[in-house]
């Protein structure tokens, strides 16, 4: 019964067009299209339990290490949860709607009918954890600081701001210099920091010597660099009774313990040292979660469905490297990847393959040639698009373990691209050997197992790659500098893609370090589709632009896709509970631990 209900909610949320949203009057919430589902004065988010008890503790196991507590800067390794648990923004997202925001630090939001500015009025009770009020000055400083010296994810939107100004005692207005319908919502999602804390300090270089002060329900209570971080629920949290927060942030302590790799984390969970464990391997979920704590009921196995796009998971080609510039080479290596055999070996054949970046959702490209609005959007770029963008692209299917047909297709493509086998080794006409390095973190034995199978296959083409396993600090450094040939890649995508897509695929990321454009793609067609998404005036136009973008990305052959899971596997101690009503996004940001509670 859950999936049809979520589908109806999703359809309803995308039915109307923007002019109905931009009402030019202060409101409690805003939606990308049409009206937000929850009315003024709503009780709580639909997937939260407003009667959930407070208290208890939850311990999670994390891989790697950390050397900073500031997730808003370029440098350093930070526990990823801090960005969401330890900071607040003016508005908050409902993960039961594609893109709706409701008042958080801001009591109201106001957007003019033309969509040229957005104005927020701060909640009169909003306070930082030290008891001082959140001011307009804090908001303006946070936006400018993050937009100029903060993480790249904040800088694209800041460049689109013509003016940021105070409006009265509690108001702040952002005026835009471009037509971008998503900006009004994006401006509501920036973390708000305390300006006074950073006076005389180098924000961009902050490490573990500074515990940032924020207005969030949780504060960093204790930590040991590289070992653990403990967050405690603030008993004096200012917003405990606003509608957006009711039934959330129920657990008194959230503790993150750091381990060397995923195998150690699983053993720690089995031993009772941690309370939750996310499993991404379906075969392991079926075969290895029968230890005593599961058998006696102390550990519960929960399966959480979702309707998110698959995103992209696999092994990314760095097209900044000469060896991967030719799309025929990339297609050849995709052909040589025997997904069916690898999936059967690793997962027992249970996981479906990712077929495109927005698959598993209404945003995904459709099979066959592009038609209608999607075709019209792509045709102006026909001369630059790779085969498959307009006429349709599908991933190869291996017929047997040897993958003979696809290996032959790969060999032909490599020959077309100027690579032939000479004395058992693939070389070009200058005698240069075709080889590359695969960069992997040392925390994932699964990825290494995948690559070992793949390397054996590539030897039949005269290719002998090397596998480099590095620790998390080196991995982060090399990924930031795009210092790799091929690397494991995971990019989650939402039901409301927008400006962040430029950070993922935009040309600025070809040379600018620290973006998410790992593949180094520079596609005018992709950027045009993103700009169309940002300026669409109807649901149909928006969907067509995303479907067209999906075609450009998929036919670009930038990643060897592996599998996705239409459900999440969560094992947890029996005392940990979550609401029966699940959000559309499932096990995503805002779910665990946000709406869970401890029931002794």
Image: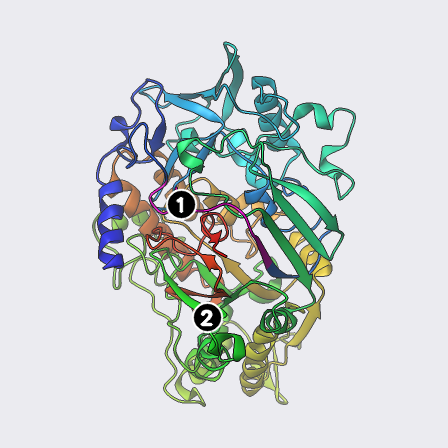
What label does residue 497 carry, if any?
Answer: 1
Q: Is residue 100 magenta?
A: no
Judging by the rendered image, the residue that carries numbered circle 2 is 562
- Name which of mark 2 and mark 1 comes first in the sequence: 1
Residue 69 position by quadrant: top right
How far from the left and from the top, in percent, is residue 463?
Answer: 60, 81
- Whether residue 98 sits left or right of residue 11 in the image: it is right
Q: Residue at x 78, y 40 (%)?
A: 209
Q: Residue at x 48, y 43 (%)?
A: 500
Q: Note whether 405 is above or below 474 in the view shown.
A: below
Task: Judge the density around disc 1: few (<14), some (14-19), many (≥20) Cα neighbours within 10 Å.
Answer: some
How far from the left and from the top, in percent, is residue 225?
Answer: 76, 52
Task: Judge the density around disc 2: few (<14), some (14-19), many (≥20) Cα neighbours within 10 Å.
Answer: many
Q: Note whether 30 is above or below 302 in the view shown.
A: above
The boundaries of the magenta stretch are 45-59
Tally of numbered tags:
2
Q: Is residue 564 visible?
A: no
Q: Residue at x 50, y 43 (%)?
A: 249
How far from the left and from the top, in percent, is residue 524?
Answer: 44, 45
Real-space Cα separation, disc 2 to disc 1, in angstroms: 22 Å
Q: Secondary structure at mark 1?
A: loop
């Amino acid at each position: 019964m859950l999936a049809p209900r979520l589908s109806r909610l999703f359809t309803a949320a995308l039915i109307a067009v923007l002019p109905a949203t931009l009402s030019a009057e202060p409101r409690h919430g805003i939606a990308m299209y049409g009206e937000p589902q929850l009315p003024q004065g709503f009780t709580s988010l639909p997937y939260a339990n407003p009667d959930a008890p407070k208290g208890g503790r939850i311990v999670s196991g994390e891989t790697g290490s950390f050397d900073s507590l500031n997730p808003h800067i370029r440098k350093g390794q930070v526990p990823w949860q801090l960005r969401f648990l330890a900071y607040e923004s003016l508005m908050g997202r409902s993960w039961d709607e594609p893109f709706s925001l409701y008042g958080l630090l801001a009591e109201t939001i106001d957007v003019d009918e033309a969509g040229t500015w957005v104005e927020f009025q701060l909640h009169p009770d909003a306070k930082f954890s030290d008891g001082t009020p959140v001011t307009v000055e804090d908001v303006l400083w946070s936006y400018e600081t993050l937009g100029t010296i903060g993480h790249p994810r904040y800088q694209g939107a800041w460049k689109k701001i013509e003016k940021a100004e105070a409006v009265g005692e509690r108001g702040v207005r952002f005026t835009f210099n471009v037509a971008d319908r998503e900006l009004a919502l994006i401006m509501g999602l920036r973390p708000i920091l305390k300006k006074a804390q950073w006076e005389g300090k180098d924000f961009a270089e902050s490490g573990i010597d500074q515990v940032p002060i924020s207005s969030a329900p949780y504060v960093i209570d204790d930590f040991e660099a590289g070992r653990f971080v403990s967050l405690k629920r603030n008993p004096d949290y200012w917003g405990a009774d606003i509608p957006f927060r009711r039934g959330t942030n129920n657990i008194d302590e959230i503790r993150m313990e750091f381990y060397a790799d995923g195998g150690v984390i699983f053993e720690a969970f089995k031993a009772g040292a941690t309370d939750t464990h996310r499993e991404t391997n379906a075969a392991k979920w079926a075969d290895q979660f029968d230890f005593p704590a599961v058998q006696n009921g102390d550990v519960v196995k929960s399966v959480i469905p979702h309707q998110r796009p698959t995103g992209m998971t696999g092994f990314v080609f760095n097209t900044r490297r000469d060896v991967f510039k030719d799309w025929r080479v990339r297609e050849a290596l995709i052909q040589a990847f025997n997904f069916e055999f690898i999936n059967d070996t690793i997962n027992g054949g249970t996981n479906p393959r990712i077929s495109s970046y927005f698959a598993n959702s209404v945003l995904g490209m459709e099979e066959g040639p592009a038609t209608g609005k999607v075709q019209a959007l792509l045709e102006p770029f026909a001369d630059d698009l790779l085969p498959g963008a307009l006429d349709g692209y599908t991933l190869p299917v291996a017929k047997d373990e040897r993958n003979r047909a696809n290996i032959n297709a790969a060999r032909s493509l490599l020959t077309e691209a100027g690579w032939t086998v000479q004395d058992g080794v693939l070389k070009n006409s200058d005698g240069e050997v075709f080889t590359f390095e695969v960069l992997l973190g040392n925390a994932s034995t699964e990825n290494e197992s995948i690559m070992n199978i793949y390397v054996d296959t590539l030897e039949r083409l005269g290719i002998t790659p090397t596998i480099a396993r590095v620790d998390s600090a080196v991995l982060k450094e090399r990924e930031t500098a795009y210092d790799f040939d091929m690397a494991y890649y995971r990019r989650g995508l939402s039901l409301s893609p927008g400006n962040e897509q430029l950070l993922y695929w935009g040309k600025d990321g070809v040379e600018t370090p620290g973006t998410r454009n790992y593949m180094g793609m520079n596609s005018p067609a992709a950027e045009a589709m993103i700009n169309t998404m940002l300026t669409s005036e109807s649901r149909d136009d928006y969907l067509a632009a995303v479907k067209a973008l999906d075609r450009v990305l998929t036919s670009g052959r930038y990643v060897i896709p592996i599998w996705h899971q239409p459900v999440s596997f969560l094992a947890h101690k029996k005392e940990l509970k979550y609401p029966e009503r699940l959000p559309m996004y499932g096990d995503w940001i805002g779910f665990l631990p946000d709406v869970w509670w401890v029931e002794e």
